[in-house]
Image (cartoon, helix red, strand yellow):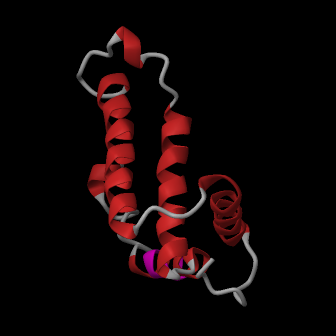
């Protein structure tokens, strides 16, 4: 796994390790980054299909009713974790940084937005 091995071990880091171990044990090797990007687009499309039909204005086909949104979101997470591993991205650290940035940036913004009242 290419992620930073010395980073604090949190839930996301553990998920990255779990995916890396699974790839080694079952998946043989990672697909290349561009292939995984295409797979990610495909998985996000499956989530979008469920959302549009179940929560949006499109009618849901009988064949789509059995699809599990959680499983499709998990597929998206799996591929994101693969891409993070392949590119040496520490998602744990990136997540912490991004949440701090959002908290600072949006501290008052959403509270004062009249459209959210």
Identify the residue at the far front of this view.
28
Vertical order, 49 against 26 (above or below): above
The image position of residue 96, as x and y in percent, is: 58, 78
Q: Residue at x 40, y 73 (%)?
A: 106
Task: Looking at the picture, tell me which residue is in the foreground, 103 or 56.
Answer: 56
- Report the span colored magenta: 97-102
The image position of residue 33, as x and y in percent, is: 39, 68
Magenta stretch: residue 100 in it?
yes
The image position of residue 13, as x and y in percent, is: 68, 72
Vertical order, 52 against 108 (above or below): above
Vertical order, 95 against 18 (above or below): below
Task: Looking at the picture, tell me which residue is in the foreground, 10 or 26.
Answer: 26
Identify the residue at the far left of this view.
58
Identify the residue at the far right of this view.
9
Q: Residue at x 64, y 67 (%)?
A: 16
Q: Name the side, left or right, on which 15 lies relative to 115.
A: right
- Please name the predominant secondary structure of the magenta segment in the image: helix
Q: Quadrant of residue 3?
A: bottom right
The image position of residue 65, as x and y in percent, is: 44, 16
Q: Residue at x 39, y 19 (%)?
A: 64
Q: Residue at x 37, y 63 (%)?
A: 110
Quadrant containing the N terminus is bottom right
Identify the residue at the far top of this view.
62
Task: Looking at the picture, tell me which residue is in the foreground, 40 or 70.
Answer: 40
Q: Name the side, left or right, on which 47 lies relative to 9.
A: left
Q: Quadrant of residue 15?
A: bottom right
Task: Looking at the picture, tell me which residue is in the foreground, 10 or 23.
Answer: 23
Magenta stretch: residue 110 in it?
no
Q: What is the tally of numbered marks visible in this picture?
A: 0
């Amino acid at each position: 796994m290419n992620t930073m091995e010395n980073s604090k071990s949190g839930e996301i880091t553990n998920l990255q390790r779990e995916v890396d171990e699974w790839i080694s044990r079952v998946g043989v090797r990672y697909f290349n980054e561009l292939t995984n990007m295409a797979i990610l687009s495909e998985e996000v499309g499956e989530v979008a299909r469920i959302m549009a039909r179940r929560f949006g204005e499109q009618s849901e086909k009988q064949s789509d009713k059995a699809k599990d949104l959680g499983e499709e979101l998990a597929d998206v997470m799996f591929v994101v974790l693969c891409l993070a591993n392949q590119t040496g991205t520490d998602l744990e650290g990136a997540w912490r940084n991004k949440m701090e940035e959002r908290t600072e940036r949006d501290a008052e913004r959403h509270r004062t937005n009249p459209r959210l009242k």
